[in-house]
Amino acid sequence: MSAGNISVAAGPAGSDIVVVTYKSRNNEYVTATVSKGQFALWLPGNELKDAATQGVEVEVTYIDGTTGTSILTL
């Protein structure tokens, strides 16, 4: 039995970013772990497979509480 595909993204977030959130194709929100200027998120499936060429949109929350949108490329 196969465990299936998993999408993983990790990298620098910057010291001023406290939350990184990805909205999946199923309209579910995946909140990354953010620590010491790095982030990591994972979700079932392979929907991040094209992120290297097309990027995916994530919402970031800054330490001051403001939010913004960023394109994540792997």
Image (tube, grey):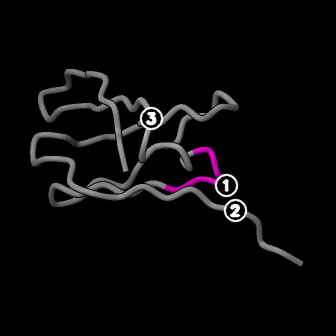
Assess disc 1: are there few (<14), some (14-19) or many (≥20) residues with their C-alpha within 10 Å of its C-alpha.
few
Residue that appears at 44% across and 35% down: 54
Can you give x and y, in whole percent of width and height, for residue 22 in the image? 47, 36
- Whether residue 59 sits left or right of residue 47 in the image: it is left
Mark 1–mark 3 CB contact (< 8 Å): no
> Tag on residue 44?
1
The span picked out in magenta is 42-47
Residue 4 image position (x, y, % from top left): 76, 65
The residue at 64%/27% (across/down) is 27
Q: Which numbered disc, 1 or 3, marks the residue that appears first in the sequence?
A: 1
Contact between labelled residues 2 and 1, with CB atoms less than 8 Å apart: yes
- Residue sitting at 64 percent across and 52 percent down? 46
Residue bearing mark 2: 5
Numbered label attached to residue 36: none
Dot 2 crowding, Cα within 10 Å, few <14, some 14–19, many 20+: few
| Of the two numbered discs 1 and 2 in the rendering, the one whose residue sits closer to the viewer | 2
* Residue 52 x, y percent position in the rendering: 42, 47
Q: CA distance from mark 1 to mark 3?
A: 19 Å
What is the distance, in whole Å, between disc 1 and disc 2 at their CAs? 6 Å
In the shown orientation, is residue 14 left or right of residue 45? left
Return the x and y of residue 36 as percentages of the image width and height: 16, 60
In the rendered image, the vertical position of residue 65 relative to residue 52, given as above or below = above
- Amino acid type of the residue that numbered disc 2 sits on in the rendered structure: Asn
Which type of secondary structure does the marked residue at label 1 adopt? strand
Q: Amino acid at mark 1?
A: Pro
Disc number for residue 54: 3
- The quarter of the picture where residue 63 lies is top left
What residue is at 30 percent from the left and 40 percent from the top?
19
The amino acid type found where label 3 is placed reads Gln
